[in-house]
Amino acid sequence: MDDKAKFHNTQSKLERYLYEYKNSYPKNIWHLISADFPLITLIITIVVIIELIGITLFSILLIITLALPYFYVYFRKSGRLWQRLLSKRKNFKAHHQELINKIKQVETDELKTYPDVKNYLENYNSEVEKETIRKDSIKKRYTILMIFSIIVFIGFCVITFNADTRLNRIKSMKTAAKSATETLTADSIANVYYNGEYFNYLKLTPNTPVAPIKPMPSILGSIITVEKPCNIDLYFVEGKQPFLRTIMPPFSSNASIKDSCVIRITITDSIGTPIYGIPYFDFIYRLKQNNRKIIESYPIATPLENHPLEIARRMQYLQQNSGKLKYMVEEI
């Protein structure tokens, strides 16, 4: 075989190996994504099911049902597209090295004496190197894309989970408050349980008031007298902004009160000084209605002070000092 025929034979082999190398896995970024796409779809589906249904027996059975076809295709030697892609991804490094070895094993030393052949081989090796760099770049871009997608997906899950949690808490709080308001009467009032955050810390029970408070003696002219003895029992309502409930005390028959006036109950010390941090009870008094009704205070803490430790501190103060405290009734 003369050198010309030998070169054509060598060139044919090299071009075939280069073509195989260029079309080997990964050919482009979609080649990588397509191998992981079924698994990505399954993971997203599982997260959506858990977010919508929660971790229940039904959701677990549903996830297992959806996952079975994936495991069946993965472990069954069917030679289908997904299995071929997975196999290529698993063995692509070994396959690349095999193609590079084939290229290196092609005998070209005798032909390098010809300037044209030497120039061709240099361009050929440069083309192989460029293709190697391109494939490495595809893998790097895919890795960056996956990391970014995972971060976005986790962020989306956290945001939606927190939003759902807040909505459920608000719904639960409204339901609990509505239920308590509808079912409680002047003879039935209780602490309202929401998430147990304060119940556990303050050791509350539903039917035991946070603090019984005695009335202020009518030594000040602005005070509206109540029938004696009549303590008010303060009950605690958990929620995003906790507040107090009590039953309006009965006023003395000789108390001069206008119809539809606003009455305020203030928790004070023994000399009538309001206690900072204990909210007022403001309500409308109507002469023609049964005024032995449940009344509610303002929130225990303002939005700026609305911290669980601060609210718990104020409630502990009420628990520990209820015997020393009084309540004062005024028209405002």
Image (tube, rainbow, N blue to C red):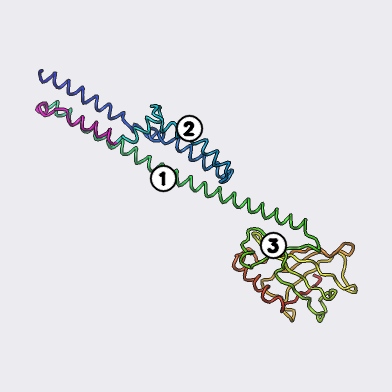
Q: Secondary structure at mark 2?
A: helix
Residue, disc 2: 69
Instruction: Name which residue lies at 21% across and 24% down.
Output: 13
Q: Is residue 294 above or below residue 26?
A: below
Of the numbered discs in the image, which one, if any, rests on residue 147? 1
Name the image quarter holding the N terminus: top left
Q: Quadrant of residue 265?
A: bottom right
On whether residue 108 falls in the magenta region, the answer is yes
Q: CA distance from mark 3 to mark 2?
A: 51 Å
Sequence-first tag of 3 and 1: 1
In this view, the residue in front, 276 or 326, is: 326
- Marked residue nearer the N-terminal end (3 or 2): 2
Residue marked by disc 3: 237
In 3D space, how far apart are the residues under numbered discs 2 and 1 (Cα atoms)? 27 Å
Q: Secondary structure at mark 1?
A: helix
- Marks 2 and 1: CB-CB under 8 Å? no
Question: Which portion, as a residue range, is magenta?
Answer: 93-114
Q: Give x and y (percent) for residue 308.
A: 60, 65
Q: Marks 2 and 1: which is nearer the front?
A: 2
- Res 267 quadrant in image: bottom right
Q: How many other residues sit within 10 Å of disc 3, few (<14), some (14-19) or many (≥20)? A: many
- Which quadrant would the C terminus be assigned to in this image? bottom right
